[in-house]
Image (cartoon, rainbow, N blue to C red):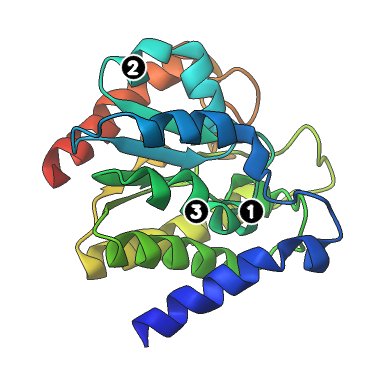
Amino acid sequence: MKKLFTMMLLAFAGLSTTVCGQDDFANFGRYQADNERLAAEANNGKRVVFMGNSITQNWYSMHPNFFTENGYIGRGIGGQTSYQMLLRFYEDVINLKPAAVVINAGTNDVAINNHPYSERRTFQNIVAMATLAKENGIKVILTSVLPAASFAWRPEITDAADKIASLNARIKKYAEKNGYPYVDYYSALVFGENRELNPDLRKDVAHPNEAGYDVMEPLVQKAIRRVL
């Protein structure tokens, strides 16, 4: 059954171009060269991959030393939903043979970047990534979706805070049930009655600034130390 599950995901990834009508919906090319470089290097068994969207991508851009000094590998792509992350999970995570993966997904799902939002489907995508990691001997660390009361590129969405809170509750429950660390960025960054991203810790309404990443880093490092 586990083998069948993996084969089905691989088949789905292979059909992504046809299904989505785009040349590279998952953006496999974004990290292809760096993945090939890492594959050729010696693996010390302590690699940690951060899988995510622009929040992860910006993290590496703003705090590159956090990644290089700790042996962390950033695999964030701006604008991506959990659907795209799941498609590239083999290329950008499993094939790198990391010791652990930190999964942060959901912001762009709620923002309806490329699919109508379905909490159930987004959650299933996150579960699928966690399952693939576990089946390949990779420790799983799940994280909350960061707070956001609105999205500058989707002003018509007015219930983002409710959707994020509901999805986070579901991720947390799943993590606890399966013994995975759950990193609660949300509680550390949320502000006010409208549950926005703290103005002192943000670049814009959906992205942390350097001070925001300063808050996030010890939280995720605690989880990484726990699993490694």
Task: Say which quarter of the image contains residue 74.
Answer: top left
Where does the image place residue 133, in percent across and percent down from the top left? 34, 59
Looking at the rendered structure, the kind of residue marked 1 is Gln
Three-letter amino acid code at the position of disc 3: Phe
Residue 190 in view of the camera: no
Relative vertical location of residue 7 with respect to residue 198 in this rendering, above or below: below
Q: Earlier in the sequence, mark 3 or mark 2?
A: 2
Crowdedness near tag 3: few (<14), some (14–19) or many (≥20) residues, C-alpha within 10 Å: many
Seen from the viewer's position, the closer of residues 43 and 215 is: 43
Q: Is residue 88 left or right of residue 181?
A: right
The quadrant where residue 176 appears: bottom left
Image spot of residue 117 (x, y percent): 70, 62
Relative depth, front residue between 144 and 150: 144
Amino acid type of the residue tagged 2 in the rendering = Thr
Do callouts 1 and 2 mark residues in contact (Cβ within 8 Å)? no
Q: Which residue is pictured at 60% across the width and 17% down the height?
A: 203
Asked if residue 56 can be seen in this view, the reply is yes
Residue 25 location, x and y as percent? Answer: 74, 51
Identify the element where label 1 is drawn.
helix
Image quarter hosting the C terminus: top left
For label 2, the residue is 68
Tell me: residue 53, above or below residue 90. Answer: above
- Left/right placement of residue 71 relative to residue 74 reads left
How much space separates mark 3 and mark 1, taking CA atoms? Answer: 9 Å
In the displayed structure image, the side of residue 187 where residue 83 appears, left or right: right
Residue 89: which disc?
3
Label 1 – label 2 distance at C-alpha: 25 Å
Residue at (37%, 32%) from the top-left corner?
40
Mark earlier in primary sequence (1, 2) = 2
How far from the left and from the top, in percent, is residue 142? 35, 51
The answer to which of 145 and 80 lies nearer the viewer is 80
According to the image, label 1 marks what residue? 84
